[in-house]
Image (tube, rainbow, N blue to C red):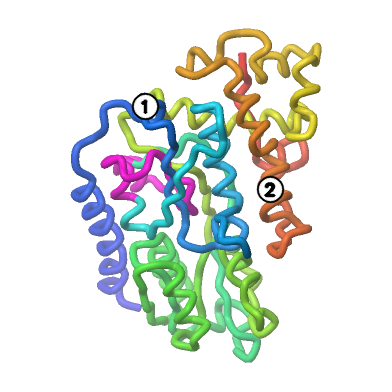
Amino acid sequence: MSIQSTLSTTSKIFLSLAAIAALAGPARADVLDDVKANGVLKCGVTLAATGFSAENNAGKREGFDVDLCKAIAAATLGDGTKIQLIPMDLKTAFAGLPTGAVDVLTHRFTQTQSRDVGGLKYPKIMFFDGQGFIVTKKSKANKIADLNNATICTAQGATSELIVADYFRAHKLKYKIVTFASQEQAWDAFVGKRCDAAINDRSGLASRLAKLPNKDDFKVLAETVSNEPIGPIVAQGQPRWESLVRFTLNALVAAEELGVTQANVDEQRSSQNPDVQRLLGVTGDFGAKLGVANDWAYKAIKAVGNYGDVWDRNVGIKTPLRLERGRNALVANGGLMLSIPVR
C-alpha cells in the first residue's frame, strides 16, 4: 500500500472529526441542571448490538450500555427508569452531545487522543477491548497475514480505518477497505459476502455473531491488533456533569470491590465498614459535592447492581456473548478495573 493511500485514510478520519466539530453548534450552559429540569436522561446508544444495546423479544432495549445509562439516571434523578434511549450512528452521536440531542453517550466508542482533544470527554473507561478480524470458515485465512489482498468492511470514520491502514502498512500487506455509514451496514455487507473480512472490537464481533443463525460458519482470527479503551462520553466544558458521570460509574466498580451488590445493597447500608458507609451515603456529603443527593451511589447500585452484576447479566459467560472478564476484571483479580476512593 502506498504512503499516499495511508495519508488519505488518516486524513479522512481527521476530516470526519472536524466535520463533527463543525456540526456541534453552541455549547450547553449546564447539562446537570438541564437533566434535572427535564426529569429525564437522554442517552445515545448503539443502533443494535446484542449484550450492549438491542431490543429484546418484548421490544424493550437492554444491555450493558443501557445499564450504564440507568445508573447515571438513578444517581442524577433518583430513578433509573427516567431515561430516553436514542440509537445513533457515529457521526450523529458525536454531533449530538454539544447540542443537547443527548446528555451522555453510553455508546461503544473508543477513547483516542483526537476525540478527547476534539471535545469528547470520557469520564471513566468501563470496557477494555481490542480490535480483531472475522472471516468465514470457508476462507483460507487463519491469521491476519493470510488477509493479504483482502477486501475489508468497516464503518466510515471509525478507528478501524486507521488501525487497518497502520497494521497492513507495517506488515507490508495489501488490502482494499470498503466503508459504510455504520458498523451495522458494514457487518451486513460482510455477512452478505461483499468483503473477505470485517474488523471491529472483539466484543462487537461476539455481539454480532450471537445474533446469526449460522454463526458457526464464521471465525474470529486469534490476533488482537489494538487496544480499545471504551466508556461513556460527555461534552467538554461540563465539569459538574463530567464529575457526576465519572463517580457514578466509579461507584459501580467500588461496589464490586467492597462486595456490595444489587441484591444486598439495602442490607449493606447497615455495614460498619467506613468505605461502604461513604459509598452508600450513610456518612459524608459526597453526593452533595457532586450536585445530587448523598445516596446517589446507593440509587445507582440499587438500579443496576455493581460492575460485576452489569457484566454478568449482559455479556458474561452465561450470556450468548460468553465473554470472560479478562482485562475487565478487578485489579485485585488480575484485571484493570480500579475505583477512585470515595473519601
Dots 2, 1 in contact, CB < 8 A:
no
The C terminus - image quarter? top right
Q: Does 207 sit above or below residue 125?
A: below
Residue 89 shown left or right of residue 200 in the figure: left
Residue 43 is situated, as x and y percent measured from the top left of the image, at: 44, 45
Image quadrant in which you'd find residue 295: top right
> How many residues crowd around disc 1 within 10 Å: few (fewer than 14), some, or many (20 or more)?
few
- Please state which amino acid type lies under the numbered disc 2: Trp
Label 2, secondary structure: give it. helix
Q: Residue at x 77, y 40 (%)?
A: 333
Residue reaching furthest to the front: 58
> How many residues crowd around disc 2 within 10 Å: few (fewer than 14), some, or many (20 or more)?
many
- Residue 37: numbered disc: 1
The N terminus - image quarter? bottom left
Image quadrant in which you'd find residue 2: bottom left
Disc 2 and disc 1: Cα gap in Å?
Answer: 31 Å
Q: Residue at x 45, y 17 (%)?
A: 291
Q: Earlier in the sequence, mark 2 or mark 1?
A: 1
Residue 130 is situated, as x and y percent measured from the top left of the image, at: 56, 58
Q: Residue at x 73, y 54 (%)?
A: 316
Boundaries of the magenta span: 94-119
- Please state which amino acid type lies under the numbered disc 1: Ala
The answer to whether residue 79 is magenta is no
Residue 164 shown left or right of residue 341 in the figure: left
- Residue 112: numbered disc: none
Q: Residue at x 44, y 39 (%)?
A: 122
3 vs 65, nearest the viewer: 65
Q: Which residue is mark 2?
A: 311
